[in-house]
Amino acid sequence: FALNATVQKVLPLCFVVFFLTYGFCGLELISMELDDPFGDDPNDFDVMGLAKVVFDDIAITIGDVDGEEAANALKKRVRLPLKQQIKLEVEQRAEYWDADGRGSRGAAGPVP
């Protein structure tokens, strides 16, 4: 109705309405493509690729600070399946805590 005052003839009004509709349909198609950017479509955000880059940067930093042996141990541990990682973590914590609930450094353990 706002266009009716601006455009007096029918043919130019039809062109304006067509291009506005075309523009809104294009915006809808773009929003459907950008929806769920963390999925597994070809145009989605590569989360695993970015995680690999971040992990490599962390490994390089650990290698610089703690040496290559620590960086290689981290890489080896990250490549383990999740169940093996959890099992290794539980075993390391069990070695740290004594039977009376005190750590190897004499600190009080977690309250059950």
Image (spheres, grey):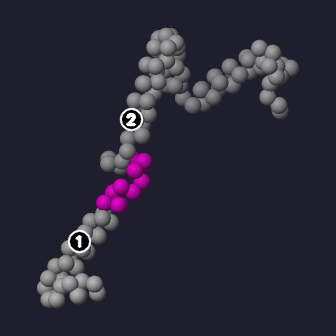
Would you say 107 lies left or right of 8 here?
A: right
Question: Closer to the camera, 87 or 68?
Answer: 68
Q: Dot 1 surroundings within 10 Å: few (below 14), some, or many (20 or more)?
A: few
Q: Which mark is residue 108?
A: none
Would you say 57 lies left or right of 3 here?
A: right
Amino acid type of disc 1? Tyr
Q: Residue furthest front?
A: 6
Q: Residue furthest right?
A: 100
Q: Dot 2 surroundings within 10 Å: few (below 14), some, or many (20 or more)?
A: few
- Is residue 90 rendered magenta in the image? no
Report the residue at 23% width, 71% height from top: 22
Residue 100's place in the image compared with 31, above or below, is above
Amino acid type of disc 2? Gly
Dot 2 or dot 1: first in sequence order is 1
Residue 90's place in the image compared with 51, above or below, is above
Question: Closer to the camera, 8 or 88?
Answer: 8
Q: Is residue 68 visible?
A: yes
Report the residue at 46% width, 14% height from top: 64
Residue 102's place in the image compared with 46, above or below, is above
* Span colored in magenta: 30-40
Report the residue at 80% width, 19% height from top: 107
Residues at marks 2 and 1, CA–CA distance in whole angstroms:
36 Å
Which residue is under mark 1?
A: 22
Q: Is residue 76 visible?
A: no
Residue 94 lies in quadrant: top right
Q: Position of residue 17 (x, y in %)?
A: 22, 79
Which residue is under mark 2?
A: 49
